[in-house]
């Protein structure tokens, strides 16, 4: 087992200490889990660094506040990750971009505004960021974070079939965006 996996598996003492108010224990938990939390909210925030930093901090503030109520029914990392995803989804809703609302294809930003090279990771991130919030949320949760459609449906308040349809839609929009960008480079 890797040192990080061992540390995560043994974070129970720090979780109990932090729940009792031990700030150093919570700081150790923060350092252990911040990478995964930040990665998830970064993708949900459309690859916006500043927003992802704010959402990551908000997630840890909420975790500190809610930690005394943590019931140890799941691993702390799982609980924290779900809390962070909820923070990011609430932020999307608060900005008026409900991740469970429909956005038509014609409301997509013009992909020609940003030069893309589909073979590069940065370009893929930009293309994902251009997706409508609902499509981006389902794509990120399913294809990047590895959630099952049942989990996505429960989290976003949609039927499993709707989650599957949105994933299909997101992939199509992503192909369209990347294809348009690649075509723009050829001309």
Image (spheres, grey):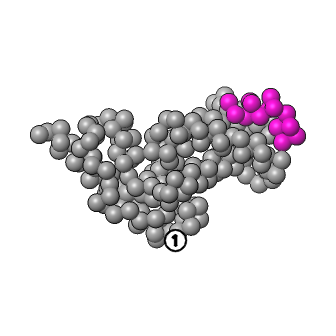
Count all numbered tags in the image, as a single digit. 1
Question: Can residue 16 be seen here?
Answer: no
- Residue at (57% x, 36% y) in the render: 53
Percent of width and height locating residue 91: 56, 51
* Highlighted range, magenta: 18-31
Q: Quadrant of the N terminus?
A: top right
Of 35 and 52, which appears nearest the observer? 52
Is residue 150 on the magenta stretch? Answer: no
- Residue at (73% x, 44% y) in the render: 63
Is residue 29 on the magenta stretch? Answer: yes
Percent of width and height locating residue 76: 73, 45
**Where 65 falls versus 94 (above or below)?**
above
Q: Quadrant of the C terminus?
A: top left
Q: Main secondary structure of the magenta part?
A: helix
Badge 1 element: loop
18 left or right, relative to 61: right
119 left or right, relative to 12: left
Residue count near mark 1 (Cα–Cα under 10 Å), binned few <14, some 14–19, many ≥20: some
- Residue at (27% x, 46% y) in the render: 111
Of 120 and 2, which appears nearest the observer? 120
Question: Can residue 11 be seen here?
Answer: yes
Toward the left, the furthest residue is 187
Percent of width and height locating residue 108: 32, 54
Q: Which residue is mark 1?
A: 159
């Amino acid at each position: 087992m890797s040192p990080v996996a061992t540390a995560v598996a043994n974070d129970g003492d720090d979780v109990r200490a932090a729940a009792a108010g031990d700030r150093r224990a919570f700081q150790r938990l923060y350092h252990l889990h911040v990478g995964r939390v930040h990665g998830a909210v970064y993708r949900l925030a459309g690859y916006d660094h500043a927003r992802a930093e704010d959402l990551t901090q908000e997630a840890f503030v909420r975790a500190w506040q809610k930690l005394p109520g943590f019931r140890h029914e799941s691993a702390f990392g799982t609980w924290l990750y779900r809390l962070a995803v909820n923070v990011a989804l609430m932020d999307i809703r608060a900005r008026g971009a409900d991740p469970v609302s429909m956005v038509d294809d014609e409301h997509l930003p013009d992909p020609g505004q940003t030069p893309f090279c589909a073979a590069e990771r940065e370009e893929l991130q930009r293309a994902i960021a251009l997706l409508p919030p609902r499509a981006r949320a389902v794509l990120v949760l399913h294809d990047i974070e590895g959630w099952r459609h049942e989990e996505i449906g429960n989290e976003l308040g949609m039927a499993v079939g709707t989650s599957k349809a949105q994933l299909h839609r997101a992939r199509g929009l992503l192909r369209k965006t990347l294809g348009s960008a690649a075509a723009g480079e050829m001309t």
